[in-house]
Every structure is written in structure tokens, then in C-alpha cells.
Amino acid sequence: MKSFPPYRIQVVREIPITTRQEREEVLAGAAYNMFDVPANKVTIDLLTDSGTGAVSAAQEAAAAGADRSYAGSDSYFRFREVVAELTGQPHILPVHQGRAAERVLFGSALGPGRISLSNTHFDTTRANVELTGAEARDLPCPEAADLDSTDPFKGNIDLDALERTLTGPDGGRVGQVLVTITNNGGGGQPVSMANLRAVRRLCDRHGVPFFLDAARFAENAWLVTQREPGYGGHAPREVAQEAFRLADGCVTSLKKDGIAPMGAFIALRDAGLAQRCEANLIATEGFRTYGGLAGHDLERVAQGLREVLDPHYLRARTAETAHLADLINEAGVDIVRPAGIHALYLNAGRLLPHIPPRGFPGHALACELYLAGGIRCAELGSLYLGRFDDAHELVAPAPFELVRLAIPRRTYTESHLEYVADVLSSIAKNPERVPEYRVVDAPPVLRHFNLRMRQV
Ligand code: F0G
């Protein structure tokens, strides 16, 4: 039986319909930087799944009744109850978004000379590790390097490499192991419960704290119920609870699986660490019962966390992404396999073999999706991950040239996604027409947000 989402649409927002000529002018005017394209010139926005999902009537109703008290608001206690039940952790701090959680936690847990080990640090996560003076080291499992393999848990951390690092000369400097579920920087692939349990054992043996970056904890839990032996009959809520309890704490952006426009939390087992984080939080984010969030934000995330683990919702969202993946494959475009949930990662390097890394095939495909159909998405290739010299020439390309199509929650219908596949299919019919790009100008920090490019 076909799955369908457990909601109907009650409030809608018009989306802009533009002409090719308009889009050519807009993109050239933005110096081919997607982050400089105004949203009112974007038809289907697949730049991110973060903070862009539709809120429910129940979330808005809760938000309307929010309590804005500075200390100990009702909204805080409702938020706290939901997060405590989910994570089982005694110390819970609200923060305004995931990267603030990272800054507060890593500022207390890491520091110069320390090392953070991860399956893959998300970009803000890496930046926040490095801002403390520590080193961020990615240890993805070997299966992740084969984009075409259908291994079910390509988001896993490499346990052998983790053990080697913990027992090796750098072992004493490891300040944390941080496992990202699902692995956004690694193709949106899930992490198995067996992998999390093994990380727990290694961290216990070496006395190192184990944290989760749990931005997509519900989608990871769902994929565990679908793919991991022994979890077939489990409710996604039980799996998520087990994952949170295996770790010593987490940083969790709620702009993804909180299905909220804004919000995040830190949850911790260790009282001393929680106290240090709380001092940092109060100085930089807000008091411990609101942490940079308004009462209505606390209410929306509390309700979003109740809704996101509904198996009907997770099944339908997974089916929607899988449907898009099938259409894209039929169009002859390869993606990182197997398809995850929050995003599909197109193999632009393979689709556009005439464009070398220095011509940025991922960026070229992202630009073409915009020019051909008003679709916005993000490059994850040499432009974003490569290394450059002072003249903006690429000196070390990224291992893969990918484009991420992120799918906001409860936002687009199947026909919107079919339109995306149609546009991609039209590009794939004549890929050699897609031009190369060069960097004109880039700032030394946060380069991909502020790049200026030109077509060749
Ligand atoms: N961790 C992961 C795995 C993320 O994907 C993100 C954000 C963050 C942390 C930071 O959270 O945005 O609330 O500060 N990812 C977004 C994305 C931006 O498009 O993938 P935040």
C-alpha cells in the first residue's frame, strides 16, 4: 500500500514562478553565488532542510499560549519534560540553534591541543572545535568512500581507526568522540546502533566522553528500524531513546528533527560539565531556562519533538525521498547510495565529466538547476571542501563533486519533487552544455557563503 503523510495542508505560501531570462539576470547579479539569490526568485528551495519545514497547527497553538517569563517559564518546563523523556539526560540547556550548542559545549569540553574525533564533523561543528584551539578529525567508515555501495550504515564511524587513535600516541589528547546522526557531511547516511554501542565501549575503556550531534536523530532511528537486524519491530521513539542514553550527552539542532524554525539543546550526564556550560550559556546565549529562545520557540520545538517520531510521518518522508531518488536514477543521474531521508547527494562529477574539478562540476550543476528550473541547492565538492591558493586557484580538490538536494519537512508535495526530477532529467540529456565556473573573489573565512564566481 502506498504510504502518505499523516497531515493535510491548511495554510500555504505562494512560490515564485520566474522566466529563464529573469533567472539568468538574477544569478549573474548574485555573481553565481546561491546564497546571494533572493528567496523570492527561487521556485523550489532545496538549499537546506534546516528551519524551513512547515509547522503544525498544534505547534502554532502551543506557541500562542507561550509563557515569556525570564526565569522558570511554563514553556521551559514543557520543553524540558519532552527533552528529558527523549534523552534520559539529567542536565538540559536550551540554546538558540545547533552551532550555539556546539560553541557552548566545546568551549567547556575542548581547548588547545585537544582532538575531537567524529564520523564526520558538520562544517559549523568543525569550526566550533577549531575555534577552541582543538583539532577536528573525521574517521568515516571505509564503506563511505564508495558512493555506489548500498551498505546500509555508511554513516558509521570507523571503529578500527577510532581504536587506533585512542590507543596511539594522540590518545591522551582526545577530548571527545562526537558521532553525527545521520551523517550529514557524509551523504546523509545513518549510523547503526551496533556502531554506537561499540563507540560507547571504546570511550569507556579510554575514559573519553561520547557525545552525539543528533540533529537528525528521528530519521536515524527510522532507518535503524528499517535496516538494522533486531530493530525491525521497534518504535522509532524507542530507538532514539536508546541512542541518546548510550551517549554522555548531545548537541541537537531542533531546526531539523525538531521541525521548528529555531531552537536546539545541549543534554549532559556530567553535572560538572553541565555547570561550566551553564555559565557560558548565561553569559552568551541567555538564562538557563530560555537560552536564546523565546517562549514560542520552546513551545514549537517541544511539540515538534512529539510529532517527529510518528512512524507514519517518518515512513512517508522516507518514501518521498526514495521516490525522488528513483526518478533521478531513471534520468541517468547517480546519487550517493543508498538514499537517505533529509537529502539526496547528486554525483555531479560523474554527470559532468567534461568539467574538471577546477571548473567546479558541483557548482556548475547547482547553477544549471537554478537556471533551468529555479531550483536552489548547494554544492558539496571542491568549491566548498577543496583547498585554494591566494590567487583562488584550486590546489587540492575534494574527493567527490556532489550537489545536495535537501528536502524541507512537510513542505513540498510529490509533484514539486517530480518537477525537480524533470528539470534534472532535461539537464542530463545534454550535460556537455553545462559551462565551467571560476572563482573571481573569495574572502579568507567562510568562503563559500561570500564567493563571487564567473562562467567560463
Ligand atoms: N550539526 C549538523 C549535523 C547539521 O546538519 C547542522 C546544520 C548543525 C549541526 C548546525 O545546526 O544550523 O541549528 O546551527 N545544518 C544545516 C544544513 C545548516 O543545511 O545541513 P544549526
Image (cartoon, rainbow, N blue to C red):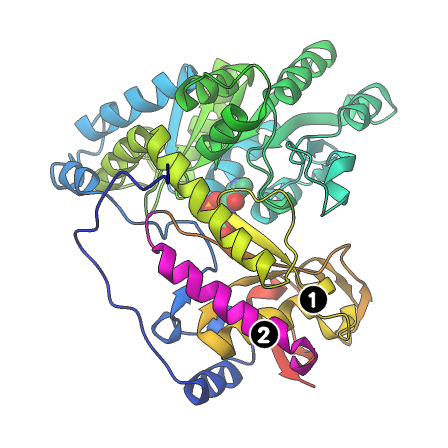
Left or right, 229 with reference to 166: left
Q: Residue at x 23, y 25 (%)?
A: 78
The reply, left or right, for residue 298 in relation to residue 207 is left
| Residue 433 lies in the magenta stretch | yes
Q: Is residue 350 left or right of residue 180?
A: right
Indicate the quadrant where residue 177 lies.
top right
CA separation in Å, label 2 and label 1 = 10 Å
Residue shown at 52%/27% (left/top)? Answer: 226
- The residue that disc 1 covers is 351
Q: Secondary structure at mark 2?
A: helix
Residue 8 is situated, as x and y percent measured from the top left of the image, at: 21, 46
Up/down of 171 relative to 35, above or below: above
Horizontal and vertical percent position of residue 146: 76, 44
**How many marks can you see?**
2
Left or right: where 96 falls relative to 231:
left
Which residue appears at 56% of the width and 34% of the height? 107
Q: Element type at marker 1? A: helix
Tell me the kind of residue under disc 1: Leu
Mark 2 or mark 1, earlier in chain: 1
Quadrant into which the C terminus falls: bottom right
Spot the residue most to the left. Answer: 65
Q: Which residue is mark 2?
A: 427
Coordinates of residue 342 in the picture (x, y in percent): 48, 45
Highlighted magenta segment, given as a residue range: 410-434
Magenta span has 116?
no
Specify whether residue 379 is in view.
yes
